[in-house]
Amino acid sequence: MHHVVVNNLSIAYQRAGDGPPLVLLHGFSLDSRTWRPQIEALSAQFSILAWDAPGAGQSQDPSATFVIGDWVEALAGTLDDAGIRQAHVLGLSWGGLLAQEFYRLHPSRVLSLILAGTYAGWTGSLSARVAAQRLEAALADASLPRDEFVKKYLPGMFGDAPSAAVQTELGGIMGDFHPHGFRLMATALAVADTRDLLQAVDVPAFLVWGSADKRSPVGVGQAMRDAIPGARLEVIDGAGHLINLERPLEFNAIVREFCTSAP
């Protein structure tokens, strides 16, 4: 792990490979270890950076006033430390919201957007009732003992037939979640609405979804594809929310093909 201090926050990130830069942004309750299959397989073609967002993994917890724009600037500082000026940006779930907002504030640094199992914010993709219910549950669940937290959230991350090995791997990652960071990330996701941004995206955009996603149904991906000019959507049959872990071969092939062919 590399470590950098950005705006008085210690941030950890992984680097691997050589080639066009590819930045990997994880979801809430997770960290950069979620991207193990991508780091292993795609580093042959790409220079990969996978960070632990402030409030996750080996990175420091931010202040209670941290909002999505603060994560954007923390990411920009991390990329500066790694010498990355422009990159393909891949965001999964909460990381997809961060990818969108990074494009909003730093469009010249984004070569392409890859959005996987994400949202235009909960407010932008779900009903007001569902968004409020999810936030209320997340704020309460952050206080659960770690084993109970994993037991509650792990099943919703996969389709109907994940392997025991991948469940164990993700359970170990989720068990290390930061309660404070989880609350902040859930709050940022709940209040976000990026629908105005989607129609202004002016870089190649690709969306990847699992047909069995229980957290962000494929209809959310279809709506985002329709909103982004020229965007493509690929649906992996039977996959759930954490498609990159559950179906890495298909996911990696899709990402590799898109990034190498994007103008």
Image (cartoon, rainbow, N blue to C red):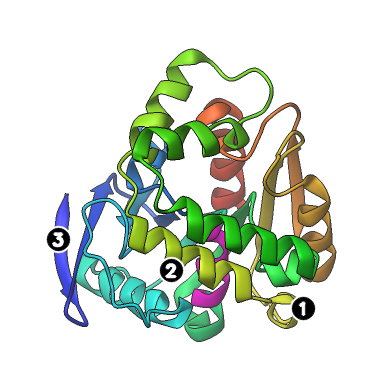
Q: Quadrant of the C terminus?
A: bottom right
CA distance for labels 3 and 1: 35 Å
Crowding at dot 3, Cα within 10 Å, few <14 / some 14-19 / many 20+, comes out as some
Residue visible at 67% across and 46% down in the picture: 215
Dot in front, 3 or 1: 3
Q: Earlier in the sequence, mark 3 or mark 2?
A: 3
Q: Is residue 87 visible?
A: no
Above or below, comparing residue 9 to residue 143 in the picture:
below
At which x and y percent is residue 132? 68, 66
Q: Which residue in the protein does label 3 denote? A: 3
Number of numbered discs present? 3
The magenta span reads 94-102
Above or below, comparing residue 42 to residue 164 in the picture:
below
For mark 3, give the secondary structure: strand
Majority SS type along the magenta span: helix
Query: What amino acid type is highlighted by mark number 2?
Result: Leu
Q: Which residue in the protein does label 1 denote? A: 199
Residue visible at 38% across and 79% down in the picture: 66
Residue sitting nearer the eye, 112 or 50: 50
